[in-house]
Image: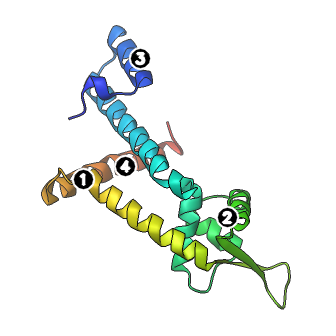
Amino acid sequence: MVTMKKLEQKYLALLGEAERRQLPDLDSIRLCFQVLSLASSIDRDCAALLAPFGLSEGRFVLLFVLDAADDGLAPNALAERAGVTRATVTGLLDGLERESLIERHADANDRRSLTIRLTRKGKQMARKAFDQHGRWIASLFLHLSAQERKTLGGLLQKVAAGMADRSDAAGGPP
C-alpha cells in the first residue's frame, strides 16, 4: 500500500487541508491522491525511459500507431488513432521528420493528401522503444499475482464506470 510519505507533496498538502477541515470520507480522498501520485510517478518513469530514444510520449504513440499501419496513414487518421488533435500531430510529425523517423508522401492524384510512413530508421527505433517499454510496463506489476492484477483491473474499471455514470447523469463532469 502506498504510504503517506509516497504521496506527492501537493497531495500531502491537500490531504492535510482536508483533514484540518474534517471533510467526510478522508479514506476516499487519500485513495484518490494515491492513485494520482502513482499515475504521476508512472508518467515520470515513462518519460525517463523514452528520453534516451529522443521520444516524448506523444512521439512514441505516433511511432507505435504508424508501425502497426503497413501502408501508412493520413495525418487525420493518425490523429484519430493517437487520440490527439490534427494540429498536435502536425507538430509531432515535424520533429519526427527532422530526425528522419518518418516520411510524408503526397498522393499522386491529390497533392493535398498525405500518407505518413515510418522510415527504416523509424521502424528500428520504434521496435527498440516498444520492446523496452513493454518490459518496463510488465515490471510495474511483477510483485502482483495474476489474481491481484485481475482484481486491480476490475476495481479500476469499476471506478471509471462510476465516473462515467455520474458524468452521463449530470451531462458532463461534476
Precedes in sequence: disc 2 or disc 3 = 3
Could you tell me which residue is drawn at 57 percent across and 56 percent down?
55
* Residue 118 in the image, given as x and y percentages of width and height: 62, 76
66 is higher (above) or lower (below) than 98: below
Could you tell me which residue is drawn at 70 percent across and 60 percent down?
95
Say what amino acid the circle numbered 4 marks.
Ala
45 is higher (above) or lower (below) than 62: above
Say few, some or many: other residues with alpha carbon within 10 Å of mark 3 (under 14 / 14 to 19 / 20 or more).
Answer: few
Say few, some or many: other residues with alpha carbon within 10 Å of mark 1 (under 14 / 14 to 19 / 20 or more).
Answer: few
Q: Which residue is mark 1?
A: 141
Q: Relative to residue 91, is residue 12 drawn left or right? A: left
Kindly identify which numbered label has been placed on residue 96: 2
Kindly identify which numbered label has been placed on residue 160: 4
Precedes in sequence: disc 4 or disc 3 = 3
Evaluate whether residue 25 shows in this view: no
* Residue 9 in the image, given as x and y percentages of width and height: 41, 22
Say few, some or many: other residues with alpha carbon within 10 Å of mark 2 (under 14 / 14 to 19 / 20 or more).
Answer: many
Q: CA distance from mark 1 to mark 4?
A: 20 Å
Which residue is at the far top? 20
Precedes in sequence: disc 1 or disc 4 = 1
